[in-house]
Amino acid sequence: MERRKVTFKLYPNARQRQMLNEWLRLHAELYNAALQERIDAYRKAGKSISYYDQQNTLPAIKQDRPELVPLGSHALQETLRRLDRAFQAFFRRVKAGKTPGFPRFKSSRRFPGFSYPDPAGWKLMQHGTRGATLRLGSGKNALMIRARGKHRFGDFTPNDVTLIHRRNPRTGHSEWQASITLRVPVEACARNRTGSESVGVDFGVSHWANYDDGSQTDNPRWVREAAPKLAALQRERARKRKGSHRYRQLSERIRNLHEAIANSRRDFIHKQTTALVQRCELIATEELQTGKMSRSARGSLEKPGKRVRQKAGLNREILSAGLAMAHQMLRYKVTETGTRLHLTNTRQLKPSQRCSGCWNIVSKTLADRVHQCPSCGLSMPRDQNSARVVLYDAWTPNNSPGTGEAARAKPLATTVAKSNSVTRETPTTADLA
Ligand SMILES: [Zn+2]
């Protein structure tokens, strides 16, 4: 069984919307009361309250507050768990020497939603291609909410659902979504592969992807547009008095823009990675390095960068989040098409410094956009060369060790140490494709 998430947009009628808002308010109230309880217990008695302490008081609370009953005990428990996770994250970060914010009280307007952690208390009914219905609760008080969305799994077991209340970043209207986790048999996840190419790919900043054959996928238009827009809004906000009405208005617009960027990014990367795994038998790329793209142009305090541009920093911020997401999506999508994903060990192989023609190390700075090999005379765009190096690494039987010390010509000596490059292969799904 695999787990897959699907999102449905909900279209509650007026009465249902009122109910959902009321339930959201009650969940927020419970969350805040539980937070208050933890704070009080610590202040007054110096003791900390666990999730289980709080869960065990739920039945008594429901006796006093019968309006909580229709929300379902598991959903109420999940809200307490949400608070517990906030505390755990807080303490984990304190332990790591960071200075996280203490878990905050949340107004019901800003409360993100609530969850049913198991298949009890709700049901998803898909109506062919004409959308779906989500039932919340049971009996005559159940809400039958119209939903739009479709999943591609014929055979599934529902696992959990999260009702998300958010403001649409484009329209500013409040809307509801249901994020549903399904448990799906492996066979139902399989995607048809339409091609059997082997591709080396270098994900970059100036282009989203550079392939070994020299082709490229451009960054979408919104990447170029988002950074200047964001910078302009931030500049404008900097001129306002903090906490003033206009300051808050601008903060909201910045928040909305961030969310719109995140949505467009997810959409773009989904489409790109799906297209890639569908046409490829083998995808080779560098393993994900934290900080490859997020390295700031500003440098560090001790080593300030040169030619610092605010825009460049924002651009990098927008793109670096996408790189991690692309890796994560590739990782699960290759199992669906039976594609081999080869992740080269960057430190060992140094794909951007290595010549794809003779395997020598050719040192370059970030500014050198063209690979020029003094040994074999190869000359090609830097990113295409890197893409070729990772592809050749995937083709090498034991993968390259790429220790990077002495230049070693291809083919590789057999005595080399084993590389840490990772290869993911799923013969079971390959058969199904
Ligand atoms: Zn060379």
Image: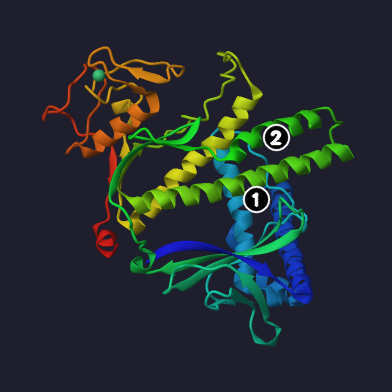
> Which amino acid, mark 1?
Lys
Q: Which residue is mark 2?
A: 230
How far across and down, in percent of the image, does residue 98 sit?
A: 59, 33
Q: Is residue 241 visible?
A: yes
Q: Secondary structure at mark 2?
A: helix
Crowd around label 1: few <14 · some 14–19 · many ≥20 (10 Å): few
Res 74 label: none
347 lies above or below 305: below
For the residue pair 90 and 373, the one nearer the viewer reads as: 373
How far across and down, in percent of the image, does residue 311 sit?
A: 64, 26
Q: In the image, is 123 to the left or to the right of 145? A: left
Q: Which residue is mark 1?
A: 47
For the residue pair 20 and 189, the one nearer the viewer reads as: 189
319 lies above or below 325: above
Q: Is residue 65 visible?
A: no
Residue at left offset 67%, top offset 40%:
101
Q: Quadrant of the C terminus?
A: bottom left
Q: Secondary structure at mark 1?
A: loop
